[in-house]
């Protein structure tokens, strides 16, 4: 039996403004106000696990312990078949620079790796999202979502965030980076995980 969340304000254990905005849009129609980790002055824990679930758990438990409130954490990334699932849980790490995250650099690096091994077309990939809802008593609920598609080049679109400009979801001729928020939020990996979360823990 899934545990239901019955509050009207939910702590999202992220400092990623793009993810937080997506969550805000997704939760808005439900009458649930979301607050991010940065707004609560929470420290960002080091993500040391090798799975999406493991890293989501680290973030959720750290937020719960710091605030005493239930918290929802997201860990997500892109898995590319020809790169044996990389970058996967290290998706954000590929964008790290001394000056902060540079996803333009990361996308270029990704394409160069595919070119270096002469990866066949279509260059299959999928975005993955794990949502972990944790309570102060240690209980947690886990939901996952995936968006299959392919890597394309050159980068297209200025919407979204992360690797969106080089990911073309199945059934579409445009990238996530070219989609408006409403369109992406209907089909994204996070939207699919979110729908499972709503059905399982919000009863709506």
Image (tube, rainbow, N blue to C red):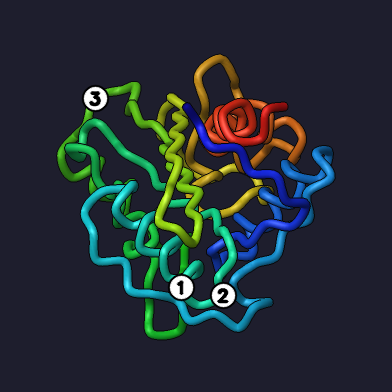
Residue 67 — which label?
2
Q: Give the labeled residue for mark 1.
A: 65
What residue sits 45% from the left and 39% below the top?
Answer: 153
What residue sits 60% from the left and 38% below the top?
Answer: 4
Q: CA distance from mark 2 to mark 1?
A: 6 Å
Secondary structure beneath label 1: helix
Q: Residues within 10 Å of mark 3 (few under 14, many from 20)?
A: few
Q: Residue furthest top?
A: 171
x, y (%) of residue 43? Answer: 48, 81
* Image height of 163 relative to 142, above or below: below
Q: Residue furthest front?
A: 137
Q: Give the labeled residue for mark 3.
A: 120
Could you tell whether 171 is left or right of 36 in the image?
Answer: left
Of the two numbered discs 3 and 2 on the same chain, state the one appearing first in sequence.
Answer: 2
What residue sits 15% from the left and 39% below the top?
Answer: 117
Secondary structure beneath label 3: loop
What residue sits 67% from the left and 51% below the top?
Answer: 158
Label 2–label 1 contact, CB within 8 A: yes
Could you tell whether 169 is left or right of 12 in the image?
Answer: left
* Image height of 129 relative to 24, above or below: above
Q: In the rendered image, which quarter contains the C terminus?
A: top right
Q: CA distance from mark 3 to mark 1?
A: 46 Å
Q: CA distance from mark 3 to mark 2?
A: 48 Å
Could you tell whether 63 is left or right of 89 in the image?
Answer: right
Given residues 63 and 186, the one toward you in this image is: 63
Secondary structure beneath label 2: helix
x, y (%) of residue 144? Answer: 43, 34
Given residues 81 and 27, the one toward you in this image is: 27
């Amino acid at each position: 039996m899934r545990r239901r969340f019955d509050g009207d304000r939910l702590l999202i254990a992220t400092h990623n403004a793009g993810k937080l905005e997506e969550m805000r849009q997704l939760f808005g129609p439900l009458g649930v106000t979301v607050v991010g980790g940065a707004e609560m002055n929470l420290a960002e824990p080091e993500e040391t696990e090798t799975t999406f679930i493991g890293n989501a758990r680290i973030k959720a438990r750290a937020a719960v312990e710091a605030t005493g409130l239930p918290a929802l954490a997201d860990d997500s990334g892109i898995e590319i078949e020809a790169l044996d699932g990389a970058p996967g849980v290290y998706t954000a790490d590929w964008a790290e620079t001394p000056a902060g995250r540079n996803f333009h650099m990361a996308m270029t690096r990704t394409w160069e790796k595919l070119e270096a091994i002469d990866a066949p077309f279509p260059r299959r990939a999928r975005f993955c999202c794990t949502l972990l809802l944790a309570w102060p008593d240690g209980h947690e609920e886990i939901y996952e979502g995936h968006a299959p598609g392919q890597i394309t080049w050159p980068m297209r679109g200025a919407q979204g965030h992360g690797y969106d400009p080089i990911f073309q979801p199945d059934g579409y001729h445009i990238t996530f980076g070219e989609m408006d928020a409403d369109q992406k939020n209907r089909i994204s990996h996070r939207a699919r995980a979110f729908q499972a979360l709503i059905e399982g823990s919000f009863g709506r």
